[in-house]
Image: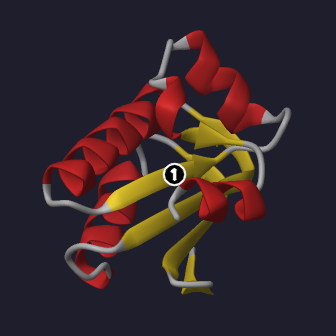
Amino acid sequence: MSFSRFGDAQLVSLTGEIDLANAGEIGKTIVDRLNDGGKVLIDLTTVSFLDSAGVRLLDALVGDLLMHGTRTRLVVGERGAARMTLQLCAFREDVLTTDLERAAAELK
């Protein structure tokens, strides 16, 4: 997991597996590092596995961020583990996008 900036948005890049073993720790780290308000991009393009705990984590994060006025996009690529899992779970399409540039433009 890494934190950086992409334009005027905070960027959280996640890699590897997100599952029951690490979802809680990932969520806590993200919440501790993000500022209130603004824009957040969560890059999942290099996530190799996402289980139901990871989906619940992302759902809670997106909901909480949006409730606090933080506009958010999940970058899932055009294919891959994260996109497939989130689509199978009927995750909200309005926050999913294919690449960082498109995500940043959607938050303008």
Q: Which residue is mark 1?
A: 73
Which residue is located at x 49 percent, y 41 percent? 19
In terms of secondary structure, where does tag 1 sit?
Answer: strand
Tell me where residue 46 appears, x and y as whole percent: 77, 56
Query: Which residue ends up furthest to the right in the rendered image?
Result: 79
| Quarter of the image where the N terminus is located | bottom right
Amino acid type assigned to the residue bearing label 1 in the image? Arg
Tell me where residue 32 appears, x and y as whole percent: 24, 79
Which residue is located at x 26 percent, y 82 percent? 35
Q: Quadrant of residue 49?
A: top right
Residue 79 as seen in the image, left or right of residue 6: right
Q: Nearer the viewer, residue 31 or 98?
A: 98
Q: Nearer the viewer, residue 55 or 65?
A: 65
Which residue is located at x 44 percent, y 26 percent? 52
Which residue is located at x 50 percent, y 12 percent? 90
**Above/below status of 67 relative to 15:** above
